[in-house]
Image (cartoon, rainbow, N blue to C red):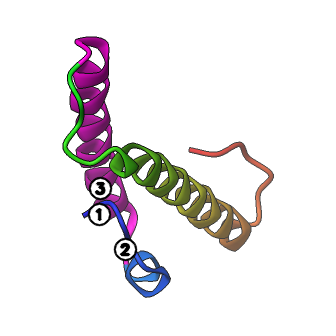
Amino acid sequence: MAILKKSELKQLDGKKIQEKLKELRDRMIKVNFQRSTKTTPDNPGQIKETKRTIAKLLHLQKELAKKRISKVGGKKKYE
């Protein structure tokens, strides 16, 4: 689930991005708990991919905020 393609990312709006971020962060909490208890995660590559997907979503979220600000024409910080 952590792998999101570019085409899937472009279709997401603000609320969907927030939902995906919450879902992925919850997954990271579970995986980090597994790591702290010294149990092996189901898929070790999942950690790296989840982190990358979170970063992609945060980047997309900032780009959308920039577009909203530029449409208004003001020089405001990100929401």
Dots 3, 2 in contact, CB < 8 A: yes
Q: Quadrant of residue 74?
A: bottom right
Which mark's residue is nearer the viewer, 3 or 2? 3
Dots 3, 1 in contact, CB < 8 A: yes
Q: Position of residue 17 (x, y in %)?
A: 36, 59
Q: Which residue is mark 2?
A: 12
Whether 58 is drawn above or below 71: the answer is above
Q: Residue at x 43, y 54 (%)?
A: 49
Q: Amino acid at mark 3?
A: Lys
SS of the residue at dot 2?
loop
Q: Which residue is mark 3?
A: 20
Q: Residue furthest right?
A: 75
Q: CA gap, disc 3 to disc 2?
A: 9 Å
Q: Which residue is mark 1?
A: 16
Tell me which segment is drawn in magenta: 12-38
Q: Residue at x 46, y 47 (%)?
A: 48
